[in-house]
Image (tube, rainbow, N blue to C red):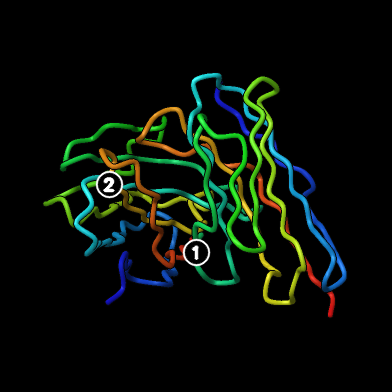
């Protein structure tokens, strides 16, 4: 009955590989997000999707490509992984027209070696 | 650009004492100010929020104050308990589609 679930929780991969992180929310929210948390714990918005449409792309390299097949899912695909991509990636969702809080997933710890 | 500054970066208090964390935001259009608690290995969890038409909000041991003129908002935790130990983030939002987070405060409550 998890509200926002991400898979995998941990991801270790080599430089240059391509990987995906999946996110699903069962809250019926219309907006989903990807945030990146670096080693110093800074949390920064990457993307926002509202009703499957991209609303915000916060100057993220185009190696990162989010895809929203429906309102309940927002996946993140990363091409040609670099060492600097190592971080914890959080998916979140909210119901924007009701001004509700953003619910976060448990995070995916990505380590690029 | 949009920026939220948060202080202190670490805070150690004795159990039962109060803890105060302060944030300052730059975007005058910000109208929503949530506070999140992040425990080790978990995602941020909302603990309290305030909107720009309110100056203060309280929920049991937690309170938040907002000074729109000075662009300051603060989190107050009273009667701290060891389970309050975590990283706390303030955030500000002028757009419904993103939160700008502060840099976080690591709170340690000593038993």
Q: Residue at x 43, y 72 (%)?
A: A10
Q: Is residue A12 above or below residue A94?
A: below
The numbered mark, 2 or 1, whose residue comes first in the sequence reads: 2
Q: Residue at x 70, y 22 (%)?
A: B70
| Labels 2, 1: one chain | yes
In the picture, residue A72 is in which quadrant? bottom left
Which residue in the rendered view is the most extreme toward the left? Answer: A70
Secondary element type, mark 2 = loop
Q: Quadrant of the C terminus of chain B?
A: bottom right
Where does label 1 land, which residue? A111
Percent x, y of residue A81: 40, 52
In the picture, residue A58 is in which quadrant? top left
Q: Quadrant of the N terminus of chain B?
A: top right
In this view, the residue in front, B29 or A67, is B29
Report crowding for label 2: few under 14, some 14 to 19, many 20 or more residues within 10 A (C-alpha). Answer: some
Q: Pointer 2 indicates a residue of which chain?
A: A
Percent x, y of residue B46: 50, 57
Left or right: B94, with B27 as reference point: left
Left or right: B71, with B9 as reference point: left
Percent x, y of residue A15: 44, 57
Q: Residue at x 66, y 40 (%)?
A: B65
Percent x, y of residue B4: 63, 34
Q: Residue at x 44, y 69 (%)?
A: A12
Q: Are marks 2 and 1 in contact (CB under 8 Å)?
A: no
Q: Pointer 1 indicates a residue of which chain?
A: A
In this view, the residue in front, A90 or A96, is A96
Report crowding for label 1: few under 14, some 14 to 19, many 20 or more residues within 10 A (C-alpha). Answer: some
Q: Which mark is residue A95?
A: 2
Instruction: Report the Cα–Cα distance between label 2 and label 1.
Output: 31 Å
Secondary element type, mark 1 = strand
Q: Which mark is residue A11?
A: none
């Amino acid at each position: 009955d998890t509200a926002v679930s991400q898979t995998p929780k941990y991801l270790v991969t080599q430089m240059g590989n391509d990987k995906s992180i999946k996110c699903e929310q069962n809250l019926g929210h219309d907006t989903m997000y990807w945030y990146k948390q670096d080693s110093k714990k800074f949390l920064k918005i990457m993307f926002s999707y509202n009703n499957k449409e991209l609303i915000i792309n916060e100057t993220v390299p185009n190696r990162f490509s989010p895809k929203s097949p429906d309102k309940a899912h927002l996946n993140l695909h990363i091409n040609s992984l670099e060492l600097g991509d190592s971080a914890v990636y959080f998916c979140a969702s909210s119901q924007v027209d009701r001004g509700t809080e953003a619910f976060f997933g448990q995070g995916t710890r990505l380590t690029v070696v | 650009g949009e920026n939220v500054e948060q202080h202190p970066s670490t805070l150690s208090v004795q159990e039962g004492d109060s803890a105060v964390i302060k944030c300052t935001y730059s975007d005058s259009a910000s109208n929503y100010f949530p506070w999140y608690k992040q425990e080790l290995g978990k995602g941020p969890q909302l603990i309290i929020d305030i909107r720009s038409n309110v100056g203060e909000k309280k929920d049991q041991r937690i309170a938040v104050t907002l000074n729109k003129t000075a662009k300051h908002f603060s989190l107050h935790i009273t009667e701290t308990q060891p389970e309050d130990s975590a990283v706390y983030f303030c955030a500000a939002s002028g757009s419904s589609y993103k939160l700008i987070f502060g840099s976080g405060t690591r709170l340690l409550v000593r038993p």
